[in-house]
Structures are given as C-alpha cells and as structure tokens.
Image (cartoon, rainbow, N blue to C red):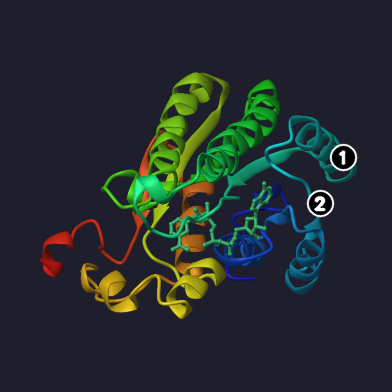
C-alpha cells in the first residue's frame, strides 16, 4: 500500500468504470480506502471493480431512487460512505450553439449537474448526519475559461460552484466539499474525438504550461489529497489539475 490514508473507510466513485473515475478508484484503493465503483454501464463497472479489488454498485446518477437505493445498499453491507467522488459526466464535442440539439443540451445538464447534485445530496446528507465526510466533485478547466462547449462548460461551472455552496452548508456538520478541475486527459471520449479529427491534440497541449496532457492518475492523486486528512482545513475550493493549462493560456496566442 502506498500509504494508508483511507484506513478502510468507504469511498464511492461515480462514473468509476472508465477514464478519470477508474484511475481515481485505483489511487484510492492503493491508499487504503475501501472503494465502491458505480457507473451506468454495469458490465464495465463490474470489470473495473474486479481489476482494482473494489466493489461494483452500478446505478444511474440522474435517477434519485436508484441513487438512494444504492447508498442504502452500500451502507448496509460495507458501512458508512465517508468519501464521495461525484465524477460521472458526459463530455461534449465542440461546436456552434446552433448545432447543439436541445435534447443533447438537456442530456449533458442532466448528468453533469443534476447527477452530481443527486449524488452529493444522498451521500452528503448521510455524512452530515454522522458529522464526518468529504466530497470531491469533478469539474473542468472549462468551468473557468470559455470553450465552444455550450452545455458542457456551463454545466461544469455550475458543478464547481455547487461544491462551494455545499461546503458552506455542511461545513459545521464536519463535511468538506471541494472540486477538482482536470485539464485535458486522453480518456476514451477525448481520445475518440481526437481520432475522429474533432479535437487537435497539438492545440490541447500548446496552452498547457507543462506542454502536455494530464494523466488520469494525476487527477486521481489530486482527488485523493482533497479526501485525505492532509486536506482537513480545505473546503469549498476548486483545485485545477491541468498541467498548467489555466496558467498558460497565453502560450497559444
Ligand atoms: P469517461 O467517459 O471515460 O468516464 C465517464 C464515466 O461516467 C463513464 O464510465 C460513463 O459510463 C459514466 N457515466 C456517464 N453517465 C452516467 C450516469 N448517468 N450515471 C453513472 N455513470 C455515468 O470520461 P472521463 O474523461 O473519465 O470523464 C470523467 C469526468 O471528468 C467527467 O465528469 C468529465 O466531464 C470530467 N473531465 C474530463 C476531462 C478530460 O479531458 N477527459 C477534462 C475535464 C473534466
């Protein structure tokens, strides 16, 4: 074990079957958390959990009843959920607003905003009742810079702001809530967009101060820090893990 930050406490990672969530689940498991992976894709959820040595509890984060039932099931079998990574999200290919069907806008907002809220509501209310817990919401650098992602970027800005609002609400109940904002990570949806020629990897790296993409595990380590007791006085913040993309925007101009 790298270090025993989790001490056997239960951490739930939504959207944990792929990409950043999967890597984060691996980092948390290596640091002594008892990890539960959830995802809407049940088959991949089971497969990912098997490789990490985690539990798989698949559910759709948009569905309030399913989320409530999953939390009740996890806590009955494994004990209190002390950490939540509200990570499940949909990525949007870039484009003009007039080319974005409203049905697609609604779908992205539903997962990236309502889904994050429902996960936080169900897990955070339980944590607040017990007087302890920590939540990390996956934001994005597009929460604080404009991008031609007219549903995705606003959904992430709202999700990051939600972390601060919930931090203020639950702080006196012993619950910390933060956001992590990844830069560009070559997870399956971004890699697919690169392969289709919709995103130019050169442009994604050019603006980053470090001149490269971010590895999913690097985001996972940021999340692990925010969940750990090392971050015991940190709440309501948004931590970019972006290879210096926010710092280096002028490098591409
Ligand atoms: P990914 O597609 O590899 O992983 C997302 C997972 O969420 C998938 O396994 C998917 O099945 C799951 N999911 C989707 N809808 C769900 C739902 N309704 N309920 C439960 N699970 C659901 O993508 P990723 O790049 O790892 O993205 C993870 C998070 O990181 C997202 O919130 C994304 O917006 C954010 N993010 C990604 C990048 C990047 O460059 N990849 C950058 C910034 C932020």
Question: Does the beta carbon at disc 1 come under 8 Å from ligand 1?
Answer: no
Q: Going by the image, does 22 lie left or right of 60?
A: left
Quarter residue 70 falls in: top right
User: Dot 2: within a 10 Å radius of its alpha carbon, few (fewer than 14), some, or many (20 or more) residues?
Assistant: many
Q: Verify CB contact (< 8 Å) between mark 1 and mark 2.
A: yes
Q: Does the image show residue 234?
A: no
Residue drawn at x 45%, y 67% is 218
Quarter residue 19 falls in: bottom right
Residue drawn at x 54%, y 46% is 104
Q: Position of residue 39 (x, y in %)?
A: 72, 54
**Nearer-the-camera pick, 147 or 3:** 147
**Nearer-the-camera pick, 155 or 17:** 155
Q: Position of residue 18 (x, y in %)?
A: 63, 65
Residue underneath mark 2: 57
Residue drawn at x 17%, y 63% is 248
**Nearer-the-camera pick, 30 or 146:** 146
Q: Position of residue 32 (x, y in %)?
A: 67, 60
Q: Residue furthest front?
A: 98
- With respect to residue 137, does 167 lie above or below? above
Q: Does the image show residue 97?
A: yes
User: Residue 73, which numbered label?
Assistant: 1
User: Dot 1: within a 10 Å radius of its alpha carbon, few (fewer than 14), some, or many (20 or more) residues?
Assistant: few
- With respect to residue 12, does 16 lie above or below? below
Distance of label 1 from label 2 (alpha carbons): 9 Å
Query: Quadrant location of ligand 1?
Result: bottom right
* Quadrant of the drawing holding the N terminus: bottom right
Residue drawn at x 34%, y 77% is 201
Question: Does the beta carbon at disc 2 come under 8 Å from ligand 1?
Answer: no
Secondary structure beneath dot 2 equals loop
Q: Position of residue 170 (x, y in %)?
A: 53, 23
């Amino acid at each position: 074990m790298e270090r025993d930050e989790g001490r056997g406490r239960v951490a739930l990672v939504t959207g944990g079957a792929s990409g950043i969530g999967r890597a984060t689940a691996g980092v948390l498991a290596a640091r002594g958390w008892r990890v539960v992976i959830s995802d809407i894709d049940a088959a991949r959820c089971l497969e990912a959990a098997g490789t990490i040595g985690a539990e798989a509890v698949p559910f759709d984060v948009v569905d309030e009843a399913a989320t409530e039932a999953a939390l009740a099931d996890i806590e009955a079998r494994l004990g209190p959920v002390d950490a939540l990574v509200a990570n499940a999200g949909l990525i949007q290919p870039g484009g003009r607003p007039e080319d974005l069907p409203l049905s697609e806008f609604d779908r992205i907002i539903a997962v990236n905003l309502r889904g994050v809220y429902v996960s936080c509501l169900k897990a955070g209310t339980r944590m607040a009742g017990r007087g302890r817990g920590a939540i990390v919401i996956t934001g994005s650098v597009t929460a604080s810079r404009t991008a031609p992602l007219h549903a995705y970027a606003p959904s992430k800005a709202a999700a990051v702001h939600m972390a601060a609002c919930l931090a203020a609400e639950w702080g006196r109940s012993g619950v910390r809530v933060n956001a992590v904002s990844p830069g560009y990570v070559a997870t399956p949806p971004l890699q697919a967009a690169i392969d289709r020629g919709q995103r130019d990897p050169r442009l994604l790296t050019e603006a980053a101060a470090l001149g490269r993409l971010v590895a999913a595990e690097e985001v996972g380590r940021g999340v692990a820090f925010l969940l750990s007791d090392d971050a015991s006085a940190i709440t309501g913040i948004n931590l970019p893990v972006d290879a210096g993309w926010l710092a280096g925007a002028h490098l591409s101009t």
